[in-house]
Amino acid sequence: MKKHLLSAADLSRDDAELILRTAEELRSLADRPIKKLPALRGRTVVNLFFEDSTRTRISFEAAAKRLSADVINFSAKGSSLSKGESLKDTALTLEAMGCDAVVIRHGASGAPHRLANSGWVRASVVNAGDGTHEHPTQGLLDAFTLYRHLGKRHAGAWQDGALEGRRIAIVGDVLHSRVARSNALLLHTLGAEVTLVAPPTLLPVGVETWPVETSYDLDGVLPKADAVMMLRVQRERMSGGFFPTAREYSRRYGLDGRRMATLQDHTIVMHPGPMVRGMEITADVADSDRSVIVEQVTNGVAVRMAVLYLLLGGSEPAVSTGDAGSIEPFETTEVAR
Ligand code: NCD
């Protein structure tokens, strides 16, 4: 593993599978009454959020706390950032206080790279979404969710290569979606076949260099897909008109009950959130048995725990398997104190 996680392209297949296996060990914690491990005790994780977020911010916070790290949450609103302080001065402040990992979300594509490569901080930098560029931990939690549903298990564990040849459709506003970009790269690394489905106006320039197929025909793609990932139309990043009307968009590219009926029995429906019900996905689809949207959120915590644990130097299994050298969970009494 590299020191920072800035892009899904930073991950080799071995790195990605190590994170997913570690997340699988850690996920079992979510079912325990005491959801805490001492693995990052004494370490400090800063959540630096310059853009709005619900899921990602609280997911990183929960992940760091479940590993016993100290967590500092820093959002643009209510800080000196709203007084015009620069990323550099914010970074120098964090460095002066001492932190081991900085989780950053920023409206500018490339901001996490700037932070990681500037020498302003010594910490590991994790990209939690930069502009329309990348969101690698979302890609990882989506891959993790796909492994859990589509992966073949052998003796209770996944077989590596579980996504080999699986067909994943990513549908909607690909142009503005850092989720789509990170997923396309990562799922390709893991051997899946990705098809991006969008109107021509919502596909990025240069998409032909991505390791994916593209299509404008959702009805043609759905029956072949093993998973369908719907994307929100990101109106806050749109200046012009990218499609005639919301109704027209939903008619061509929305997932409704009629379209869902054309999916194979095992096919799952995903969405990174936040959803606009009635736009890219109807409520009956979002709430159906095929939908794994809530599970994606649960999986996000386990995956982010794995990322923080591995970036901050964990080389042993995160959860005790009874082997010598692995980290024991807290004794109940110790947590209660
Ligand atoms: C996405 C994001 O912020 O990139 N959401 C998320 O992190 N779960 C997608 C979106 O905003 O539509």
Image (spheres, helix red, strand yellow):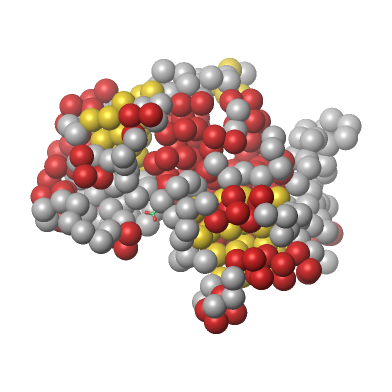
Instruction: Check the image and report above or below for 320 versus 208.
Output: below
In-image side of 129 versus 251 (left or right): right
Classify the position of ligand 1 by quadrant: top left, top right, bottom left or bottom right: bottom left
Q: Residue at x 52, y 52 (%)?
A: 110
Instruction: Check the image and report above or below for 175 versus 208.
Output: below
In the picture as drawn, the residue positioned furthest to the front comes out as 118
| Residue 134 is at least partly visible in this image | yes
In-image side of 245 versus 222 (left or right): left
Determine which quarter of the picture holds residue 307. top right
Determine which quarter of the picture holds residue 258. top left
In the picture as drawn, the residue positioned furthest to the right comes out as 324
| Residue 127 picture location, percent across and down | 57, 51
| Residue 137 picture location, percent across and down | 54, 45
| Residue 24 is at least partly visible in this image | no
The image quadrant where one finds the C terminus is bottom right
Q: Residue at x 31, y 26 (%)?
A: 213
In-image side of 46 versus 85 (left or right): right
Taking depth in this image into account, of 57 and 240 the one nearest to the observer is: 240
Q: Residue at x 68, y 65 (%)?
A: 91
| Residue 242 picture location, percent across and down | 19, 52
The image quadrant where one finds the N terminus is top right
Q: Residue at x 22, y 36 (%)?
A: 260
Taking depth in this image into account, of 128 and 335 the one nearest to the observer is: 128
